[in-house]
Image (cartoon, rainbow, N blue to C red):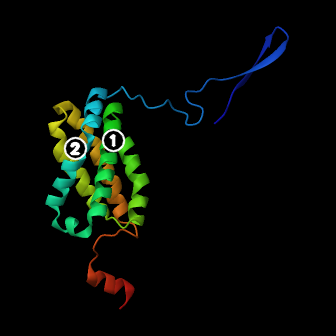
Amino acid sequence: MRCIVRAVRRTGGWHARLASVSHPSLGRPPTDMTAGFPDAAARMRTARSRIAARGLEVALANDAGMGERYDELGLRRLLRDTELLVERIALSVAADDPSLAGDYANWTSILYRRRKIPMDDLVGLLEGIRGVLPSVLGQGELVAAGAAIDAAVEAYRWSRRLAGDARKKNALLQFIYKGG
């Protein structure tokens, strides 16, 4: 990035002025958290625990094997993680910027791989949240929330293909790749 310096003569000597930029470290303005639906985001934050608990229930009902993979502590951690996902979706709804949820999914996929949580389970949690949100949001607000959930699902599905994902793998393909 090129800076333009302009010398200005003032009383007492010369002074240098830099050209103004919108944001010195990023080169763009900060996210406007009132550009989207801030009231809907506030409702989501208020009902965050209820949305997360119901979203986890829906995810467990849709995937029978998910309940068997986790003990009580693992389910509590998933509930906490679901609350964090709801919070990030609320930020995306407030700013009407789905990349906030997608970036969060990119950042956290590494941690979930380290904890041996399959990306498919996280996609299931997000779909569970999607199923619960109509009880909290209106029709126009659901579009913004759906876009945020889609961005997070896309990031988790992309991370699913990387080595280290804890999903159940095809035994025949593993035999062929590893050679016996």
Q: Residue furthest top?
A: 11
Let me know if residue 134 appears in the view: yes
Question: At 20% from the left edge and 31% from the top edge, which residue is drawn?
Answer: 140
- Element type at marker 2? helix
Question: At 79% from the left edge and 18% from the top edge, which residue is drawn?
Answer: 15
Left/right placement of residue 61 relative to residue 115 reads left
Task: Categorize mark 2 by other alpha carbons within 10 Å: few (<14), some (14-19), many (20+).
Answer: many
The three-letter code of the residue at mark 2 reads Ile
Left/right placement of residue 134 relative to residue 98 reads left
Residue 73, percent from left and from top:
31, 62
Q: Which quarter of the image is occupied by the N terminus?
A: top right
Q: Is residue 113 above or below residue 143?
A: below
The answer for how far apart the CA atoms under marks 2 and 1 are is 10 Å
**Which residue matches tag 1?**
87
Residue 169, percent from left and from top:
29, 75
Left/right placement of residue 11 relative to residue 148 reads right
Question: Quarter of the image holding residue 23?
Answer: top right
**Which residue matches tag 2?**
51
Question: Quarter of the image holding residue 110?
Answer: bottom left
CB of mark 2 within 8 Å of CB of mark 1?
Answer: no
Q: Which quarter of the image is occupied by the C terminus?
A: bottom left
